[in-house]
Structure formats: C-alpha cells, structure tokens
Image (cartoon, rainbow, N blue to C red):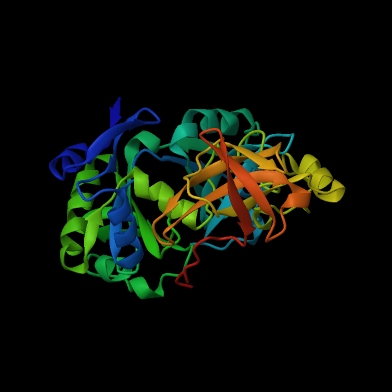
Amino acid sequence: MKKTPMYDEHKSLGGNMVEFCGWNLPVHYEVGIVEEHRRVRSAAGLFDVSHMGEVWISGEGAEAWLQRLVTNDVEAMHDGQVVYNFMCYPNGGVVDDLLVYRFSRTRYYLVINAANVEKDVAWLKMNLPPSGVELRDVSSQTSEVALQGPAAERILQKLVSFDASALGFFHFVPQTTLDGVDVLISRTGYTGEDGFEIYAPWEAGAQIWRAVMAAGKDEGLLPVGLGCRDSLRFEACLPLYGQEISPSITPLEAGLGFFVKLDKKELIGGAALRGLKEGGLSRKSVALELLDKGVPRHDQEVRYEGRPVGFVTTGGYAPSLDKSIALAMVPADLAAEGTEIAVVIRDKEKRARVIKKPFYRKNYKK
C-alpha cells in the first residue's frame, strides 16, 4: 500500500488509517468524522490529498486539443483560472471529472481523481495528436493539502506574502513560497466551503503539512480525514466519480450540464450528449430527505408505489442538517420537488421526498 509524505504525521496525530485507492490514508482522527465535519464548516480542516493525480499539458496545440477533450470551454479561460470539467467517452459516459488550470494558451495543469490516475493518463495518451502537444504525468512528484473552512484565508495569510483575500474563487497563484518551499496555491476545494489547495514537491509534503497545522493552531484548525471529505462534498452535492458520475452516468443525467458546452462540435462524446439533450433525459439525479428513520447508502433501491425505479448514488447522515439525506437516480417524471418515493433500507421501504439541491449552500469567496 502506498503512503503519502504525511503518513507519519497522520499516525502521530491519531489518524485511523485505511486503504483507499491503494493508498494508506486517515479516514478520521481521534475526534471522529462528525466533529471533523463540523469543524470544517465552523473553522477549518486540513486534508492530505496527495493521492490525487497531476498532469502537465503543453505545446502549441494544447488549447485546441483540450477543447476537444474536455466538456467546458477551455478557449474562454484566462491565465490563472481554474475550470471544472469532464472527460467523456464517445457514448457520453464519464471517463473522469477534473480541474483544468491555465498557465497560458500553451501550458495547462490537470488535477485528476486518485482512483483514475492510470486510466486517465492512458486515455489522455491514447487521444494525443501526432504532434503539437506534450504530456507529463507528475502525480508521483506532487504532494497536495487542502485547507478548507471559513478560517482558511486567515490561516493561509500567516504563511504567504501575497494578499490571500485578493485571490478569487477558482483562481490560482502559479508560484509562491510557503515555509521556504515553492508551491502552487488555488482557491478551490471539495467541501462546499471557502478554502485553498496547496501543491508542493513530494518531498516537501510533510513540511507544508506541519507549517499549515502550526499556523492554524489558534484558529481552530483540525487535521481531517476521508470520512468528512465525503460527507462535506455530499451535503454540497458535489459529485463523486463512480457514484454520481460514471461510464454509465452522463454529466447531463447527473444535473451537471452547466459544465458541458454542447456547441463544441469536436468534443469527444459531444454528439451523444447533444442527442441526449435533444431527445430529453429519461432519468435524473435528485436530492432526497428521509421522512422515516433510517440511513440510506450507495446503491440501495429506490421505489415508487412499490415498484423499483432507481437507486441511491450517495446516502448518509448530514451533520450540518442533522438529518438523513441521499442523492438518487430516478426517472425524469419523478424528479419534481415534493415527489414522495421510498428508499429500501434493510429490506424495508423508508419514505423520502425530493427536495431542491444542494442540501447545504455556502457563499464562496468570489
């Protein structure tokens, strides 16, 4: 099992280590998932996300190639901007969701999911043009921490010389120093809170972790694990690959069409997605609140009037709301707010109601 540079830090802090995508990572620390979740919402948490993948794309043909490869509008990006994207198969299913960082029209940085690094890099290479675009996978050379929560800006400002308050949402500083280490810092995250993601050389990961933890000591900062990373993103209705999106679930069905520019004629998967849009979606992702006691889980059956109609993509207890909630894929004619359906939990139907997304809404720094 692979270890990140922060492995010893996690152990010394009481991290409960588990296997995740071939990595040994903390699912939570001594205070537990719920307290870590609430601390990120109220103050700040620090995540080790060094298992994520990072790829450089460069060359004169980089912009045109990415415009064909990913769903959002790369040509409309400006230097220093980050844009959320999907890579799709020709049938419209999702290869992965990813972040695209623009350094210039000839230089981009892709951040991809840990579970998909090998698959994504293979897909990128398979679709490379004969010339004009170069790819460099630096996943094994890059560590990453995510500082998330309303106190994140104050904590970061103690460590950097630039004005953290001036860095806009989904923008980045391409190079600065933190504790003497050259880093890339973006105002991005996966929690529904304001926050930053800090990329550093692999060998400097533990140093960056310790520096951020020390700066946050008086700000309520906690080390936090995979458990609350999932519950936080779930409350904010941020998708998880393999659950809300997958090779068999398109971005349109997942309710993420905003990030898909269907007017891009050369887009891989574009024709299938345009056909799906024009023909009307047969199913949609919806948000559910449980009306009966029970905790829904991934892949549980959803029923309407006693018949199976869909499945839960993510379910669980929401600490911020103190209720059980779920995201589910259901027929489009059952997707209206207020529709009552049932989730099958331990062979029993539990009443649920379709509500508006997201479950939790935060005002991001603009």
Q: Is residue 323 left or right of residue 337?
A: left
Residue at 35% across, 43% down: 226
* Residue 74 position within the rendered picture, expressed as x and y whole percent measured from the top left: 63, 54
Rendering quarter of residue 173: bottom left
Q: Position of residue 325 (x, y in %)?
A: 51, 52
Residue 286 appears at what percent x and percent y?
A: 64, 52
Looking at the image, which is closer to me, 302 or 57? 302
Above or below, 103 relative to 123: below
The residue lying at 54 percent from left, 40 percent from top is 241
Residue 345 percent location from the top left of the image: 53, 38
Q: Is residue 195 left or right of residue 105?
A: left
Residue plotted at (23% across, 56% down):
222
In the rendered image, the residue lying farthest to the top is 1
Quadrant location, the N terminus: top left
Which image quadrant for residue 4? top left
Which residue is farthest right?
279
